[in-house]
Amino acid sequence: MSEAGAPILETRGLHRSLGSGAARIHVLRGLDLRLEGGRTYAIVGPSGCGKSTLLYLLGLLDLPDDGEILLRGERVDNAPEQERTRIRGERIGFVFQFHFLLAEFSAAENLMLPMVRRGGLDPVAAMDKARELLGIVGLADKADRRGNQLSGGERQRVAVARALSNNPDLLLADEPTGNLDYHNSETLFRQLQQLAREQNRSILIVTHNRELAAACDVCLEMRDGQFEGAAVP
């Protein structure tokens, strides 16, 4: 974990183009970004403005054409593929719009299995940690329920717990409340914000939900591959 207020992630002059030939599009145009520990950030903007492309770069799932990505002061975009995979698995968590839970496994098993697969924990220790994480998101009493026995809001909270299983400094969320009703969206967001503040994580949410974005510590408006400005509520 980084110290409170210190940058967890920084980008400098990120550029990314997609496609080839006449169809090639300059998607990101020199983005600078600084994410600090203990804070929640939102990126909003119209479809096609570059939000998802940026998220893939920050998660080391794609590489920039130019610019730098630093995680806790260490440049990571130029690391070999195997090293980027290791960094992603150990220091970055992902929450997607769709939970991708295994319906036939329990909530705890959905957390335990990836922890065992990553190595470092035996099944018993992984199950203990899975139950602890489910408690953090308010689902301790649902640990043994199968994925298909959980509500939409509960499944998404399991997905948040799973994203925390590698104890990440940075949590990236792509439309995490897109399939939830107002109550469940609000509950999930409050939990994310609490996790950021209590555990000194940096959480970045890409969303079309303006109310959720306004509740974040920092809201960044993106248009045509650039940030138009930041608002601090």
Image: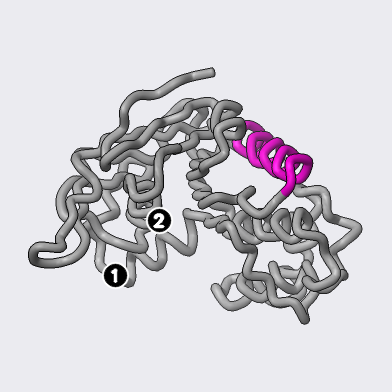
Residue that label 2 marks: 59
Q: Residue at x 48, y 64 (%)?
A: 89
Judge whether residue 81 can be spotted in this image: yes
Q: Residue at x 45, y 32 (%)?
A: 36
Left or right: 187 as drawn, with respect to 26: right
Q: What's the residue type where badge 1 is placed?
A: Glu
Q: Is residue 178 above or below residue 44?
A: below
Report the predominant secondary structure element of the magenta stretch.
helix
Magenta segment range? 181-199
User: Is residue 38 in view from this perspective?
Assistant: no
Distance between mark 1 and mark 2 Cα atoms? 13 Å
Verify CB contact (< 8 Å) between mark 1 and mark 2. Answer: no
Residue on which the image places disc 1? 81
Dot 2 crowding, Cα within 10 Å, few <14, some 14–19, many 20+: many
Within the magenta stretch, is there residue 195? yes
Amino acid type, residue under disc 2 in the picture: Gly
